[in-house]
Each structure stands twice: as structure tokens, then as C-alpha cells.
Amino acid sequence: MSMATALTWFFNFLLAVTFPKFQDAFHNTGAFGYYAAWCVVGWVLILLFVPETKDLTLEQLDARFSIPSKSHAKFALKQCLFVIRHYVLRRQHVKRPIMELPPQEDDYGHQEAEPRKISLEKDGRTTAFAPLVTRYSVHCMAELRTSVPGQVGGGSGSADDAASGWH
């Protein structure tokens, strides 16, 4: 928090020092236009490189940050086009984009058969950034549901083991 406050004060100082010089050189319109252009540049960089983390669990955050930046940037541009088409142009039959990643091997050498999709259908609406679910994790979840207490994959069988995914 102190870093954020220090950075805010630094940029306030930078603005206070540079604004009178810009105002003399470019008048009010040019000075505010210069700062507005930097705001637009910042907005684009945040759109492309900062992933959305609102209302995500720790597992979903881990999956979200395992996505390459290039894939996230492509998805962000598709999502921006969706917002323009759906909310600005009022086209009701435009589908919300879903982030798809190429198949990967997990830690155990299992190859996924189909691309992973990071979305969640809820109440007929698609919400992006649901956790990545591989065949192995689905198998483990099914094993946890069907196992007898005390026999979770050779572990101690405690509730903590089942909740944390250790088995």
C-alpha cells in the first residue's frame, strides 16, 4: 500500500511540475490532450496485459495467471469487440468470446484431447475465466466424490486433504 501511495504522490508531483510548462507551450487544450493521450495508452496496456481477477478463488487465480500474455491480449481484443457490438451497436445475437488454449501436458504427462475453455455458463450467461479443468482434475474430483472417507488416494483421508486436493 505504501508503494501505491508513493507512486501516486510521485505522479502528482510530476503533473504539478510539467503542467504549467505544457500550458504555456500548448495552451489548455494541448496540455489536457497530452495527458488524455497517456490515459488512453495506459487503458490499452491494462486491457491487454492485466487479467481480470474479480470474484475468483485461489485455484481460479492460479489458472488465470498460467495463461500466456499473448493469449490474454487476443482474448481482451475479442472481448472489447464483443462489448462494442453487443452494448453499443445493440446486436443481441453476438456471442461472448471464450478463451481457448491449446492442449497441454499436465504434471503427470497426461495430454489433453481438446482445447481448454475458460468460461462458465451460469443462468444462460457466459462468464469468462472459470477454472481450467483437465481430464486429470475431473478424474481426481470424481475419485474424491466416490471414495470412502479414510481412503482418499492413499492419503490420510482427512477433510483437509480432500479440500486441498492432496491425494
Image (cartoon, rainbow, N blue to C red):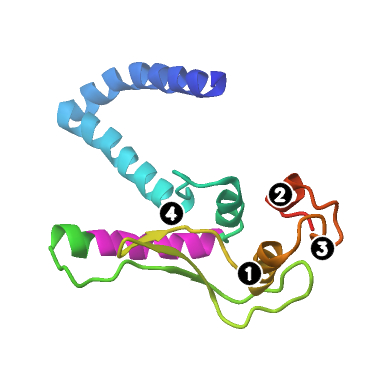
Region rendered in magenta:
69-83
Camera-side residue: 56 or 46? 56
Name the residue at 79% across, 58% down: 167
Q: CA distance from mark 3 to mark 4?
A: 41 Å
| Image marks 1 and 4: residues in contact by CB distance under 8 Å | no
Mark identifier at residue 48: 4
Camera-side residue: 34 or 140? 140
Amino acid on which disc 2 is placed = Ser
Residue 161's x, y, as percent? Answer: 76, 49
Name the residue at 16% across, 68% down: 92
Task: Quickly name the residue at label 2.
Answer: 164
Magenta stretch mostly in which secondary structure?
Answer: helix
Instruction: Say whether residue 164 is left or right of residue 79.
Output: right
Q: Of helix, strand and loop, which one carries label 1?
A: helix
| Image marks 2 and 1: residues in contact by CB distance under 8 Å | no
Residue 28's x, y, as percent? Answer: 17, 26
Residue 62's x, y, as percent? Answer: 61, 52
Residue 115 lies in the magenta stretch: no
Q: Looking at the image, is mark 1 or mark 3 nearer the viewer? A: 3
Q: CA distance from mark 1 to mark 3?
A: 14 Å
Tell which circle, 4 or 2, labels the residue nearer the N-terminal end.
4
Tell which circle, 3 or 2, labels the residue nearer the N-terminal end.
3
Residue 72 lies in the magenta stretch: yes
Q: CA distance from mark 4 to mark 2?
A: 32 Å
Amino acid on which disc 1 is placed = Val
Q: CA distance from mark 1 to mark 4?
A: 31 Å
Mark identifier at residue 138: 1
| Image marks 4 and 2: residues in contact by CB distance under 8 Å | no
Tell which circle, 1 or 3, labels the residue nearer the N-terminal end.
1
Instruction: Say whether residue 150 is left or right of residue 15.
Output: right
Q: Is residue 144 above or below residue 57?
A: below
